[in-house]
Amino acid sequence: MPTLRELLDRFRSAGPPGPAAPAAVPVDRRSRLVDEVAPVFAALAVTDEHAAGIVAAARAEAERTRDQGRREADALVSRAEQERQAGYAQAFAETRAAANRRSEVSAAQARSAADDIARRAARCRPALADLALRKIRGSIEAAPDGTVP
């Protein structure tokens, strides 16, 4: 549907002001402009198709790059998970080895202390046995009726 301006343009005079001009067909400027630029747009159609091809190729390349990035990221995450598990295993082994070393040191100290106690007891045993024997004999002799208290 033509706009109001286009409708009024049809009744504009076809010639310069002055005496009446011969009857003429109203001017259709829009169709004349379309006819004027049609060859330019026809020539640009090839360029437009070429540009569409470039855009399609760029989209395909972007999708390939995105897929490759996803694969690389998945591989990186997988490697990190494996390294994390290996790190946990190594830390556990190191902690266990340190605990074993501390346990061995504690056991050695306990054995040394026990050996010291056994040596002191061995040195004191004869004297303690004599003392106990004397006390027992003394308590037997101290009883007036000869009974053991």
Image (cartoon, rainbow, N blue to C red):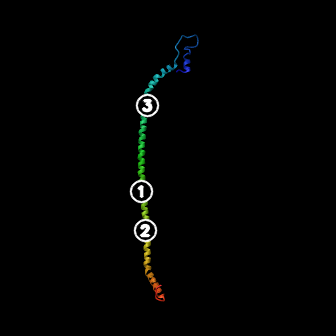
How many residues crowd around disc 1 within 10 Å: few (fewer than 14), some, or many (20 or more)? Answer: few
Instruction: Give the SS element for disc 1.
Output: helix
Q: Kindly give the residue lying farthest to the bottom in the view shown.
A: 144
- Give the mark nearer the N terminus: 3 vs 1: 3
How many residues crowd around disc 2 within 10 Å: few (fewer than 14), some, or many (20 or more)? Answer: few
- The three-letter code of the residue at mark 2 reads Ala
Q: CA distance from mark 3 to mark 2?
A: 81 Å
- Give the mark nearer the N terminus: 1 vs 2: 1
Above or below, comparing residue 83 to residue 140 in the picture: above
Q: Is 63 on the left-hand or right-hand side of 6? A: left
Q: Is 14 on the left-hand or right-hand side of 78? A: right
Above or below, comparing residue 64 to residue 9 in the picture: below
Task: Give the residue at x 42% y 33%.
Answer: 56
The percent position of residue 18, horizontal first and vertical second, equals: 58, 11
Instruction: Give the SS element for disc 3.
Output: helix
For the residues labelled 3 and 1, say whether their Cβ atoms are less than 8 Å apart.
Answer: no
The percent position of residue 28, horizontal first and vertical second, equals: 52, 18
Q: Which residue is mark 3?
A: 52
- Give the mark nearer the N terminus: 3 vs 2: 3
Q: Which residue is mark 2?
A: 107
Q: Which residue is mark 1?
A: 90
- Along the line of sight, which residue is nearer the eye, 16 or 95? 95
The percent position of residue 65, horizontal first and vertical second, equals: 42, 40
- The three-letter code of the residue at mark 3 reads Ala
Task: Give the residue at x 44% y 25%.
Answer: 43
Above or below, comparing residue 23 to residue 107 in the picture: above
Choose mark 1 or mark 2, whichever is in front.
Answer: 2
Above or below, comparing residue 63 to residue 119 in the picture: above
Q: CA distance from mark 1 to mark 2?
A: 25 Å
